[in-house]
Amino acid sequence: MRSSRLSRIVLLLSLLLLVVPRSNGIVTAGHEDMPPHGIVCTENPTATFTLTTQEGTISLPDGNRVYMWGFSEGGDPFQHPGPTLCVTEGDTVTIVLNNTLSHDVSIIFPGQEGVLADGVPSEPVFDVGGNLTSFAPVAAANGGAVTYSFVAAKPGTYLYESGTEPGIQVNMGLFGALVVRPAAHPNWAYNEIVASGAVTYTTEFAPDEEFVLIFSEIDPVLHMAVEQGLPYDMNNFTPRYWNINGRSFPDTIAPNGAEWLPEQPYGSLIHINPYDVDTHPYPALIRILSVGSESFPHHPHGNHSRIIARDGSVLIDTDQSDLSYERFTVNLGPGQTVDEMFAWTDVENWHPIDNPIPVVIPQLQNLTFGTFYSGSPYLGQTDLLPVGHQALNSCGEYYHIAHNHALQQITAWGVVLSGHITFTRIDPPLPNNCQ
Amino acid sequence: MSKEYLTREISRRQLLKLGVGLVGVTAVSAVVPKALLKPYKVVEASPDVQPARQTAGAGTYRHYAATDGWVYLPGQNLPYHPDNLAPDGLTTYIFGFRNVTSIEDDHDKVFQQKMKAQLTSPMFWLDEWRDTASQGETDFTLRLTNLGLQMRPDLIDAHTLHFHGFRNAIPIFDGEPHSSVGVPISRDLTYFYRARDPGTYMFHCHFEETEHVHMGMVGGVFVRPKQNYLGFGGDPTSAARLGGNTAPGAPMGYAYNDGDGSTAYDREFAFVVSEVWTLAHWCDSHVQLPEWSDYNPDIYMMNGRAYPDTIAPNGGAIDSATGDLIPPAGRPELQYQPISSLVTCNSGDRVLLRFINLGYVEQSFRLTGIKMRVVGHDATLLRGRGPAGNDQNYFTDTVHVGAGQSVDAIFVAPEVDTMTRLLLFSRNFSHLSNPGIAGHGGPMTEVHIYPTSQPLGPQNEPNEWGL
Ligand SMILES: [Cu+2]
Ligand SMILES: [Cu+2]
């Protein structure tokens, strides 16, 4: 089982290394335009989107395909998860929901205030008997439509998700991310500035190091019941797959728009450069969202993350003092979002001649070698690897895993080392010859 | 189309579980008779001797061995627990680490520790880097030797050591085998750590981690702050005993470089919290694979023991003749679970509790009677950034710690006239029993507060009682 998993990684990474270098990270939807890694924004000048519900299937690492529902922009084919909608603080956001499914569907926008549905306040819907039927006005089954609108008043990272039969429909895939950028500072996560004595801190991030990670889970029995039109008792809910951006490792580290994952366009590889006061002073911004049913303790190796906001609220006190904090594991509750800044610094500056590591690394035959290892402990160096070893390292870059520490959830129904795993790739300082 | 495929997948798995599973059990039972399993030693520590539990090789170097083994856990959940393949007196198959520093010169003795892993692993601690001149005292190396798995000669698993939370780690010393290297059977690798950030961390094997971590390859790590040596506010007389200050009244240590003494403590206890899903451990000894999405642990532990064993004495001394562990006094079945969770202190002591969760579920630890002050989380002082960083520590009676997280809390022991007990336990009451038996169990321990008229001995290591 392990060898087949590794060969799948080999396939993915060999393709990963062929893709074009990163662009600026901001494009409109459309696979052909996507940067290989980082956020893929769907955006337009009027902040008006048409979300059409679609049915389709996604691919999972055990070879299974699971029947899904999803939101797609305009007439785009099915995708999972829904498009990442990027707007600017102060925009009036308009979302037209066209429903092609045989069930009523609605959308709720947690964190947004004053949401309208067809021009009147979006409120829970009750039937004539007084029973709650939906958290928000619906687009009726089989061709109905509803238009939601709101002013994106506060910068931040938010979910949008189904408000109708949400236990079923969100698991089926009816969710996506909404990013609201500060109007004056598109490269800041938030407007606020922390004052600490003579020092101030902003939430400015490296513009090509912005990432979205949506953590989800799938109970395939639920999906089978929905596809067959059978009832499903949520008390039997038992997730078997755990996805980031709709993919399970190793698919998570494949590039955005990977052609062998046509329904799952969003990768999760965190591709960054090391901190440098002159050439790379700003950290990555990682926007983390959960649509799961329990806490997901996400643990990136390599360094702590600084949590700067929760649920779209920046962690700054009313007196401008700092409420942000560093964690090595972020325990993300159901429906929560967290914005974290992440950087890695070459603290020791190990160098094979000038500053060698103080221990001897055993000879090749005395170790097992990882797929992502360069053969050298040094950043930017490569060295010998065993004959026949599939090295997926381009230029001596470092890789660190980032994974859910509820380790039963880094599996995929019988496949281990899958599920909620992605990797951080740290390139040697610029200029480099990395691909 | 997907529907039919899905149905086929489910039935194939059911077939594997029900059919091949039984074949596997029969096969292993036949080829591994109990007689082949070495009996555990019956040498015991004399109760009046405080064993030098983990100090062998203390300082800047440790040598750990990774292997399998057997431990004792209470209760019954047939057919998985007790495991029918367990040696007499023991119940549960594990993977784990051992500290073999004191016997490392004798290669045979080291390899005789195969199938003598301990649960949870020996903790280690190191000093924060202070300056270049003193880095000979603070640089830390850990040599890991893979002894192999005696019960599973079919497995050729490597092992690694992941220092979980180490800031700005480089992959070669991180222990995640895809981004660097793993240690095959009969081989070793030396990890190097120059720790620049104090706090409570943890370590575990990262090879096939869902299995190896659950099987018990987990332990605690602390980085002791340089404030122990330097004091705070430019006043070297505020250094701690751990930094060489012998003045009466000096604290044992500081949890962090707090700059104001607010994380001073006089006694130190660490709790590595984890779980056993007895079905999964039974599967490993019976050449089976559990379905991890069915994860359903039935024994919850502190330092690898379930209450009331949590308050049994510390073990962990090494029998120099065999290299094996000497069991805790009066408790031969806890030979390979040497770490006590009993908290002992005198009135007025500041007691540091380091909570480390290496289970897969979140926990809430409640201390009855008095409040704890939470000063750190994930090896981070609870304070805002910068020169005017605001204080974010807080009082609570219930500490929430997620999977893969750590929390540092300090309580001040109240005045008592006679020895007084408090309870410290997981507030998830569904965890507080041992399977199949009545009474209290699981992740619970006791705090024993002694009056100042009965002074406890100082701790040489965390979790020592000083009685
Ligand atoms: Cu291991
Ligand atoms: Cu870990």
Image (cartoon, rainbow, N blue to C red):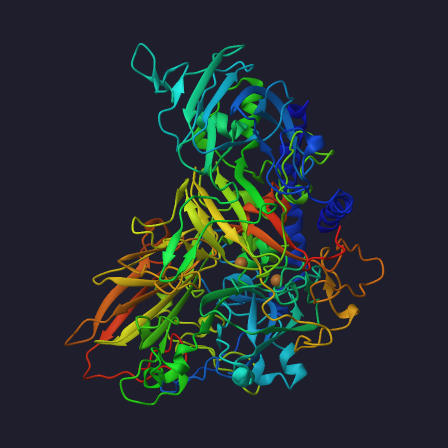
Quarter of the image for residue A21 reads top right
Which quarter of the image is occupied by the N terminus of chain B? top right
Instruction: Decide if residue A104 is on the left or right side of residue A10.
Output: left
Residue A221, compared with residue A307, is above or below; it is above
Using the rendered image of the protein, determine whether residue A136 is visible from the camera's viewpoint.
Answer: no
Q: Residue at x 50, y 58 (%)?
A: A304
View quadrant of ligand 1: bottom right
Q: Position of residue B454 (x, y in %)?
A: 22, 83
Q: Nearer the viewer, residue A10 or B159?
A: A10
Which quarter of the image is occupied by the C terminus of chain B? bottom left
Instruction: Decide if residue A16 is on the left or right side of residue B395.
Output: right
Q: Nearer the viewer, residue B293 or A406?
A: A406
- Most extreme residue toward the left is B417
Instruction: Decide if residue A172 is on the left or right side of residue B453.
Output: right
Residue B126, compared with residue A112, is above or below; it is below
- Most extreme residue toward the right is A387
Using the rendered image of the protein, determine whether residue B113 is visible from the camera's viewpoint.
Answer: yes
Number of numbered discs overlaid on the protein picture: 0
Q: Residue at x 41, y 14 (%)?
A: A118
Q: Nearer the viewer, residue B374 or B209?
A: B374
Q: Position of residue A430 (x, y in %)?
A: 69, 57
Q: Position of residue A244 (x, y in %)?
A: 57, 40
Quarter of the image for residue A267 reads top right
